[in-house]
Image (spheres, rainbow, N blue to C red):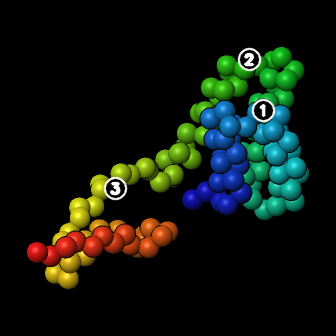
Amino acid sequence: MASEAELEIQQHLSLYLAGKLQRYEFEDWLIPTLWDLAESNDDAARELAGHINNLIAETSCGDRSMESLQEELTRIARPFSEFQPKPFMISKPEENELDFGITRKPPMAAVRPIGGLEERRVSVG
């Protein structure tokens, strides 16, 4: 199982790969994290951060292309994506007519709408 530090590195890496962080922003976050990990017992997180840092350094020196960097970082991020929760869809709940003239949507699991349950008065003829 990945450590908390590994998951945090992967999260920032995913943001970079998705284009939500610029490379300099990712590096600005990664370097202090790498320094913090130097004194940590988390060998896997330290190795991951160090490998990413080396890839970026190779690109900065011109020893690696941006395309190669993206491919390698994507390859590194792939094992972590297997542990991420998969998106799911919730079907729209049907409306039910209750005996006392109020139509309510059935509650969904433990999730309640912010404004409470919607109520609608129905005239009973």
Residue 23: x %, y % from top left: 78, 32
Which one is earlier in the sequence, the residue at label 3 or at label 2?
2
Q: Within 10 Å of the Cα at label 2, are there few (<14), some (14-19), or many (20+) other Cα atoms?
A: some
Image quadrant containing the C terminus: bottom left
Amino acid on which the number 1 mark rests in the picture: Arg
Residue 85: x %, y % from top left: 47, 54
Provide the residue designation for mark 3.
90
Residue 27: x %, y % from top left: 82, 38
Seen from the viewer's position, the closer of residues 60 and 103 is: 103
Image quadrant containing the N terminus: bottom right
Residue depicted at x 66% and y 41%: 15
Provide the residue designation for mark 2.
65
Q: Secondary structure at mark 3?
A: loop
Q: Which mark is residue 62?
A: none
Seen from the viewer's position, the closer of residues 60 and 85 is: 85
Residue 98: x %, y % from top left: 19, 77
Seen from the viewer's position, the closer of residues 79 and 91 is: 91
Q: How many marks?
A: 3
Amino acid on which the number 3 mark rests in the picture: Ile
Q: Secondary structure at mark 2?
A: loop
Provide the residue designation for mark 1.
23
